Amino acid sequence: MRRIARAAVVATLLGSICWGVGPADPVSGQDAPAVPTAVDDHFSQPLSQSFSVGEPGVLANDVGVPGGGPLSAQLVSAPDWLFERFTPGGAFVILFIEPPELGDYELTYVVRQVVDGEVRTSAPATVVISLVERWPTALAVDPVVLKVAGLGIKLGRASARLTVPPGVSDDLPFGLHIPEQPVTFSAGAAPLCTATTDNTGVATCALDLGQVLTAILAGGITASYAGIPTLAPSTGSNGLIS
């Protein structure tokens, strides 16, 4: 399979800073009509035979001319070994005709918008699709919460949030909470407990007195996620709050 190297879009941005205002017309000396601006996109997912992004998809970061109609996307070019469905709403589905390899693949598209009764078209933008072995994950561990119970006994709670970190892909600008995955807590070399993440990606378990003492001696806890074929393993740690 031919593998496409990632490249920058060749486009002149001068004059397009203010919603795509074109350069001056060499004959009249007046600015060309304003056009929408299509902005490059980057999406990633674990290696797969297919790839899909829902609306607004590629349109999420594009900029229209003020006062104009809604934006629509139009595919310009795609490798001939891809089968694609590209919708005006910015969504697309790709099926690799041959088994894909790890790496980057590219499409180009333009944005169209009706302004003052005429259709105006942006310069092309590039969509880079990265196929990776596994999505990276991150564990944000809360400090161990210690509560004073009856008779002065201290009880604790271990908690951590499992996410795909932000910035991995344009379709995950704020990260992604990962549910239904086991997270194991430990203090030093001593295992404490294992909990499953909820719909917000948080795994929580209560610590008994012995586990609290172990965490105190270790100076805090560590959370570990072993990973699955589409999600990479990760660890995190934090200290104590009394």
Image: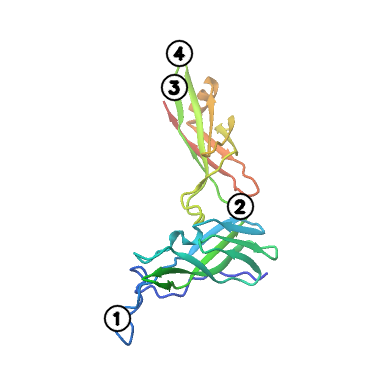
Residue at disc 4, secondary structure: helix
- The answer to whether the residues at label 4 and label 3 have Cβ atoms under 8 Å apart is no
- Residue 137: x, y in percent? 55, 47
Q: Which residue corresponds to mark 1?
A: 30
**Frontmost residue, 37 versus 13:** 37
Query: Position of 179 compared to 48: left or right?
Result: left
Distance (Cα) linking label 4 and label 2: 47 Å
Residue 16: quadrant of the picture:
bottom left
Mark 4 residue type: Gly
Q: Which residue corresponds to mark 4?
A: 150
Distance (Cα) linking label 2 and label 1: 51 Å
N-terminal-most mark, 2 or 3 = 2
Distance (Cα) linking label 4 and label 3: 10 Å
**Rendered view: 72 above or below 175:** below
N-terminal-most mark, 3 or 1 = 1
Residue at x 52% of width, y 71% of height: 7
- Residue 176: x, y in percent? 51, 47
N-terminal-most mark, 1 or 4 = 1
Query: Position of 12 compared to 171: left or right?
Result: left
Mark 3 surroundings: few (<14), some (14-19) or many (≥20) residues within 10 A: some
Mark 2 surroundings: few (<14), some (14-19) or many (≥20) residues within 10 A: some
